[in-house]
Amino acid sequence: MTKLPGFQRLVEEHWRQQVNGTDMYILTRKLKAMKPILRKLRKTHGDLSHNVQQAAQFLQTAQQLLQEFKHAGILLQLEKCCRMIYCKATTMELNMLKQRAKLAWLKGGDNCSKIFFRKITARRASQRVYQIQNEDGHLLTDYNAVTGEFVNYFQKLFGGTQRQTQNLDHLQPFARYLITDNEATQITSPVQRHEIKEALFDINEDSAPGPDGFSSGFFKASWAVTGEDVCHAVMEFFNHDRLLKQLNATLITLIPKVQLPTKVGDFRPIACCNVIYKIITKIMVKRMQIVLEKLVDNCQNAFVPGRSISDNVLLAQELLSGYNQKKLPPRCTIKVDLQKAYDMVNWDYLLAVLRLFRFPDRFILWVEQCITTASSLYR
């Protein structure tokens, strides 16, 4: 979309509209107003595959004429122009196919649309669940029964209990590290514009967009126009400690955990968030990295900068090596089910842990806003 002719001009023309309200509200209204404009732009350029075929025919005709009249300068210019149009059309088509196919690994090499079409077909087939087993092992094939099984399962999983304040002060003597006043000041220092821009440009353009439909590629391509409003909206959250619910809307999609899922538990829920929310959380995560390594025990190597999860894999192999030897003393291993830890977290417990490590109250309020203002749409 961002490569289409006229994209920049349309964004500049329609983004300047006057909207009254808070900075976050202004941004959401402008994004909503841009949707029909961009849809119209997309329709104006028609079928991208047809455009490629048409451009290829023009290029072939120009090259045939050039072979007959080799010294005609005007034909050289025509062939060059047709070649540029063809290259631009193929690039636009492949970008569209790549986005639909979600192929992040195909960065270079020959542009082969067959790969994309095969991947798109496979994705469409995998996105449909025609049958599922319920908790009793009975196979459900009716559409309403299948959807009902998914709804009931995730209602039990995410249907949290009544909130209540938790106090973990009695565990403070066992805390690995307590945040200092200087570190607390760094974590809650005013957010700068360069932090917002860095967070945005760190988001992969191929990442699935949230419910608003805008990917990071839109904001990157139009940063000269939209950047001011994006910065104002993000700064408003950090300055006033309030997050507009429209920005925190998420699209929940289910990803298979195994190759052939047979029950609802074989699917993992993934939240597709809006780009503005991603920017906010990326800034918060970067602030947390100031103290993260000090807070997390050395035995936890995943998701901590400077550590590698492969170290734990090698350690586990060493520990389990020879466990079945009879000459060794009796021993046992414990396998912990981490489903609850990764699929859901109790909000009050999370906030209590942050207080335990003496995170500043303002940062805890930011986290609370992020987790309590979310609304979800399941797909």
Image: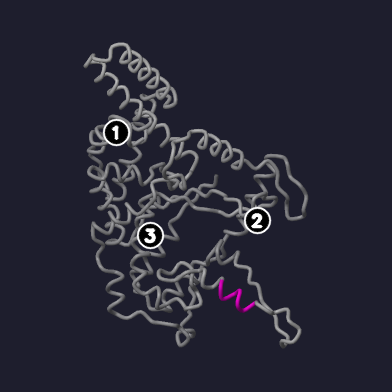
Q: Quadrant of residue 9?
A: top left
Q: Is residue 204 left or right of residue 317?
A: left
Residue 208 versus residue 370 in the image, above or below: above
Q: Which residue is mark 1?
A: 7
Q: Which residue is mark 3?
A: 281
Dot 1 or dot 2, earlier in sequence: 1
Q: Nearer the viewer, residue 262 or 331?
A: 331
Q: Nearer the viewer, residue 191 or 105?
A: 105
- Is 20 included in the stretch rendered in magenta? no
Find out whether the residues at labels 1 and 2 contact each other: C-beta distance under 8 Å: no
Type of amino acid at the residue the image marks with label 1:
Phe
Dot 3 lies on which element? helix
Q: Which residues are magenta?
A: 314-320
Residue at the location (41% across, 60% down)?
370
- Spatial separation of the CA atoms under disc 1 and disc 2: 43 Å
Find out whether the residues at labels 3 and 1 contact each other: C-beta distance under 8 Å: no
The prevailing secondary structure element of the residues shown in magenta is helix
Q: Which residue is mark 2?
A: 265
**Colour mode of the rendering:** one colour
Q: Position of residue 219 (x, y in %)?
A: 31, 45
| The C terminus: image quadrant | top right
Dot 2 or dot 3, earlier in sequence: 2
Find out whether the residues at labels 2 and 3 contact each other: C-beta distance under 8 Å: no
Q: Residues within 10 Å of mark 3 (few under 14, many from 20)?
A: some
Residue at the location (65% across, 43% down)?
129
Q: Position of residue 92 (x, y in %)?
A: 38, 32
